[in-house]
Image: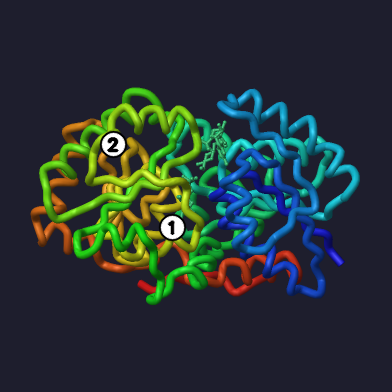
Amino acid sequence: MKKIMLVFGTRPEAIKMCPLVDEIRKRPGLTPVVCVTGQHRQMLDQVLDIFHIVPDHDLSIMKQGQTLFDITTGILEKIRAVLEQEKPDIVLVHGDTSTTFVTALACFYLQIPVGHVEAGLRTYDIYSPFPEEFNREAVSIISAYNFAPTELSRQNLVREGKKPETIWVTGNTVIDAMKHTVSDSFQHPELDWVGKDKLIFITAHRRENQGEPMHRMFRAIRRVLEERDDCKAIYPIHMNPVVRKAAEEELAGCDKIHIIEPVDVVECHNFEARCHLCLTDSGGIQEECPSYGKPVLVMRDTTERPEGIDAGTLRLVGTDEQTIYLTFKELMEDENAYRAMSQACNPYGDGFACRRIADILETGTCDPWIPKK
Ligand code: UD1
Ligand code: UDP
């Protein structure tokens, strides 16, 4: 019996790891142990509640306005005792947050093998996204098992010298999660407010966008919303006080946008599935919207998810106010431009990533995901 410890701390990691906890629980050869760092509190607990997961360990490290130093030292100090007590055979981490990097570092210090879920995403610019690109590159130096969501991410790892026999193309576990969230019968008071207008879905939180870039993003969005009478925006705002202040300064008093508290993942996926288009700097939403054929304007200078750009569903617009304004406006006015971006596709997975990862952990092998051409 192999003891598999899954460590995660933020909302997106939880959304992508909880389905894997469920799958590992079903396997006779595997015992899951869940440790959350609590890097996020409310936004993490919202996901744990939806998936009915009660962690075995909770490091509860979140502080308001935490710095990267706070998160790093907070986790490093507390996780050692948990790892020494549980003595897991393998520790699974996800993606590129500080929780991910620091947990992998702690495992390295204790010489515990690390499995990296969502391995191999790259921009090759350690300041964009910051600090995520560094985090994921550093985890790849440590990891013994690399679960790459796509062929492109596998190739990145091979190019960097990871041994091919340690890499498996599994698809992204978020596509597994989406099989259970979207439903035709979903209703919500915010959707009633939007009515027959086009729903514009907005999120923003990236550290490198905080400050002037985020102000420019919000100003551009407001200009388009106020010029048109055929759309309304829903913006579930991140709990970061820096983000909230910028949104208050730029968007207060605009009656075309509802800024609401973070929604749960079921609500979020159903909003995405019903929206006309999405403006975001999120990583996960770049993976989700293509499945529903919803165009995404990615308000960042780089993306580690070029598959959606190649498929035509994502467009990288950066954070220049006029570029965002013009692109958003064009997509609202030009049906051909809109249609060209709204073809449903699934470049990130087939919904069986968790099964593959559990197969590898249990038996050492799996049927890889081979996307349809
Ligand atoms: C973190 C990750 C980022 C990921 C994002 C997902 C790092 C460095 N960053 O960024 O990769 O894309 O999560 O959302 O790992 N807060 C709350 N309650 C919550 C969550 C956050 O109050 O449930 C507030 C706190 O004031 C906290 C702040 O938001 O200090 C920022 O949280 P933090 O985890 O430091 O950064 P994120 O921007 O959320
Ligand atoms: N999400 C959510 N509620 C919200 C906003 C986002 O459940 O109010 C989900 C979204 O569907 C996606 C994930 O959170 O699965 C993305 O998280 P975020 O943008 O915070 O982080 P990133 O993906 O950029 O790391």
Kindly tell me whether mark 1's CB lies below 8 Å from ligand 2.
yes
For the question of whether residue 140 can be seen, the reply is no
Residue name at image x 55 percent, y 72 percent: 352
Q: Is residue 137 left or right of residue 33?
A: left
Q: Secondary structure at mark 1?
A: helix
Place of residue 7 in the rendered image (x, y in percent of width and height, measured from the top left): 70, 49
Quarter-of-image position of residue 65: top right
Q: Is residue 44 visible?
A: yes
In front: label 2 or label 1: 1
Would you call the spot at circle 1 few (<14 residues within 10 Å), some (14-19), or many (20 or more)? some
Residue on which the image places disc 2: 318
Q: Residue at x 45, y 27 (%)?
A: 242
- The relative height of residue 64 versus residue 335 in the rendered view (above or below) is above
Q: Disc 1 marks which residue?
A: 268
* Sequence-first disc among 2 and 1: 1
Give the crowd class for mark 2: few <14, some 14-19, many >=20 residues within 10 Å: some
Taking depth in this image into account, of 78 and 127 the one nearest to the observer is 78
Local SS, label 2: loop
**Residue 144: x %, y % from top left:** 71, 50
Q: Position of residue 365 (x, y in %)?
A: 68, 70
The residue shown at (82%, 71%) is 29
